[in-house]
Amino acid sequence: NQLFNKTNVAAELRLTDNVSGLDPTSLQILLDNVSVKNQFTPLTQPILNATLTANLSVAQGIHTLRASVRDLSGQMASASVRFTVDTTAPVINNLIPADGSLLNNATPKISAFWSDNLSGINLASARILLDGSDVTLQAQKTQTSFNLTPSSPLSDGLHTLFVSIKDRADNEA
C-alpha cells in the first residue's frame, strides 16, 4: 500500500500485449469503482505496448485504482493497486506535565499520547527535547505514547519540552 501526503497523485499504467495487440475500446480504468479513463492519456488505436499517465485528484483516504483491457483476440487482463492519501498530521495530546505546571519533583514523569488515524505513526521519527537537549533515546516509546523520567534531577526554574512525531506519510505534528 503506497502512501501519499498530497491529494494530487501521479498515476502510470503500462499495458503490453506482444501477440495480437491491445483493444482500445475495451480499456477500463476505475478509481474507487468510478471511471477515470478520460483523465489518462488516450489509447486510440490497437498497439502492442502503451504507457498511459494521469494526475489524479483524490480525497484523503484509502483508494483502489483498477485497469482492465482485452487484446484483439479477446483475452482480458486486469490489475489493481491500493494506495492511501494522508494529508493530516498526527495528534499529540495529554502532555504531562501540562504547560505552566508548578512541580515539587526534580525528576517528574513526562509523557504524552500520539495518534494518527490513517497511515499510522512513524515511531522512528519521534523527537523529544528537554531544555533543548535531545532525550528521545531515554524515553520509552510505543505506537501510542511516550514516557520519560529525566536521568538526572532538573534544576529549579522554568523548563521547556518539545515533542514531535511524523506519520508514515511524513506529516509532522
Image (cartoon, rainbow, N blue to C red):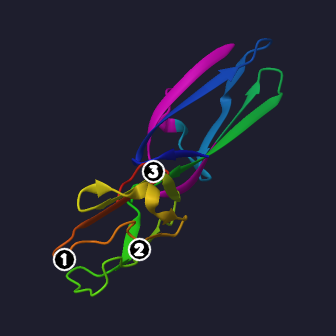
Q: Earlier in the sequence, mark 2 or mark 1?
A: 2
The answer to whether any part of residue 44 appears in the image is: no
Residue 128: x and y, percent? 36, 60
Crowdedness near tag 3: few (<14), some (14–19) or many (≥20) residues, C-alpha within 10 Å: some
24 relative to 134 in the view: left or right: right
Q: Residue at x 74, y 36 (%)?
A: 78
Residue type at mark 3 is Val
Instruction: Choose between 13 and 116: the one closer to the eye.
Output: 116
CA–CA distance in space, label 3 to label 2: 33 Å
The answer to whether any part of residue 76 appears in the image is: yes
Residue 116: x and y, percent? 48, 65
Q: Which residue is mark 3?
A: 58
Secondary structure state at the residue bearing disc 3: loop
Q: Earlier in the sequence, mark 1 or mark 3?
A: 3
Instruction: Choose between 45 and 120: the one closer to the eye.
Output: 120
In which quadrant of the rendered view does residue 21 lie? top right
Residue type at mark 2 is Ala
The magenta segment = 38-65
Q: Is residue 119 magenta?
A: no
Q: Earlier in the sequence, mark 3 or mark 2?
A: 3
Crowdedness near tag 2: few (<14), some (14–19) or many (≥20) residues, C-alpha within 10 Å: some
140 relative to 69 in the view: left or right: left
Q: Which residue is mark 2?
A: 112
Instruction: Choose between 101 and 169: the one closer to the eye.
Output: 101
Crowdedness near tag 1: few (<14), some (14–19) or many (≥20) residues, C-alpha within 10 Å: few
Secondary structure state at the residue bearing disc 1: loop
In which quadrant of the rendered view does residue 97 lie? bottom left
Q: Which residue is mark 1?
A: 156
Q: Is residue 49 magenta?
A: yes
